[in-house]
Amino acid sequence: MKFVSFLQNNQAKFGISDGKNITDLTGKIRGANTLKELIANKLILEAKEFLKKNPGKINLDEIEYLPVIPNPGKIVCVGLNYSEHVKETGRTVEQNPVIFLRVPESQTAHKQPIQRPQVSESLDYECEMAVIMGDAGKHIKPEDALKHIVGYSCYNECTVREWQQHTRQFGMGKNFEKTGSFGPHMVLAENISDYTKLSIQTRLNGKVMQSASLSQLIFDIPSLISYVSKAIPWRAGDVLVTGTPGGVGFKRKPPIFMKEGDQVEVEISEIGILSNIIKDEKI
């Protein structure tokens, strides 16, 4: 089951996609005008029942995608979480995960432009798995962590490299407007039997640039959820972005950065393909 957030006639909506059509759930289930509200109020079952009697009527050609969760309370990102990426950056594996935050305004959506900022020519791709949190919680034990996940999606956690390197903190290079693509949809966690068996890759203009298995994460998803929860309570609709494999553009020789007109795709098996065109910022 694939949940999407979208615009139709400039109105923000959400629903369930079958790959061709969408069943609009906006305001159809009491207490759920957004996907985040559906998750927070634990109404996934009601959404399934609504779908049985209401097949999709909105064609995908009629909508513009929004980020899966357009307004997450927090986007928690993980750096240096694949060995090959640690190696190519010249770093060492840390005892604890490298954590940084993204703001919602940095996001864009499937089939919407990823924006190359005016102040940089070093926009880099980063394929990642996004985890969408369901039940809220603090001090979550690793063995209980997967129960707190409602779904998974694709994320292209694009980075403006020289701004990332201004200081030891990653923040500015990770938060430029419309550089974090999130989508195309959320697949329910219950439909993924074992996330470690999923594969992930980035394609730039059709060429594979990154390829890995989710089993290669240094810090697995349960340990990441548990670690963060010791400091910050997870809330429904929060997003965990789990790290990128080796093969990033700025460590290639010569470096490869994205430019206007490039097409970049992130694919995760059993989840889907997130596709974007690069567009230069205009003022």
Image (spheres, helix red, strand yellow):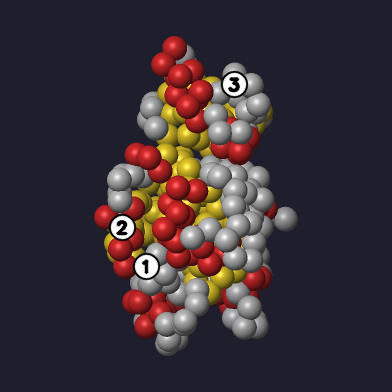
Residue at figure coordinates x 54%, y 44% from the top left:
134
Q: Is 149 left, or right, of 33 in this rendering?
A: left
Query: Looking at the rendering, in which quadrant would you find the N terminus?
Result: top left
What is the residue that sits farthest to the top in this orientation?
Answer: 53
153 vs 7, nearest the viewer: 153
208 vs 118, nearest the viewer: 208
The residue where tag 2 is placed is 196
Crowd around label 1: few <14 · some 14–19 · many ≥20 (10 Å): some
Q: Amino acid at mark 1?
A: Leu
Q: Position of residue 119 (x, y in %)?
A: 66, 70
Q: Mark number for residue 217? A: 1
Residue at figure coordinates x 39%, y 53% from the top left:
265
Query: Looking at the rendering, in which quadrant would you find the C terminus?
Result: bottom right
- Cα separation, mark 1 vs mark 3, equals 37 Å
Closer to the chain start, of discs 1 and 2, is 2
Q: Amino acid at mark 2?
A: Thr
Q: Mark number for residue 29? A: 3
Is residue 219 at all visible to an observer of this figure? yes
Q: Amino acid at mark 3?
A: Ile
Q: Position of residue 114 (x, y in %)?
A: 54, 54
Q: Mark number for residue 52? A: none
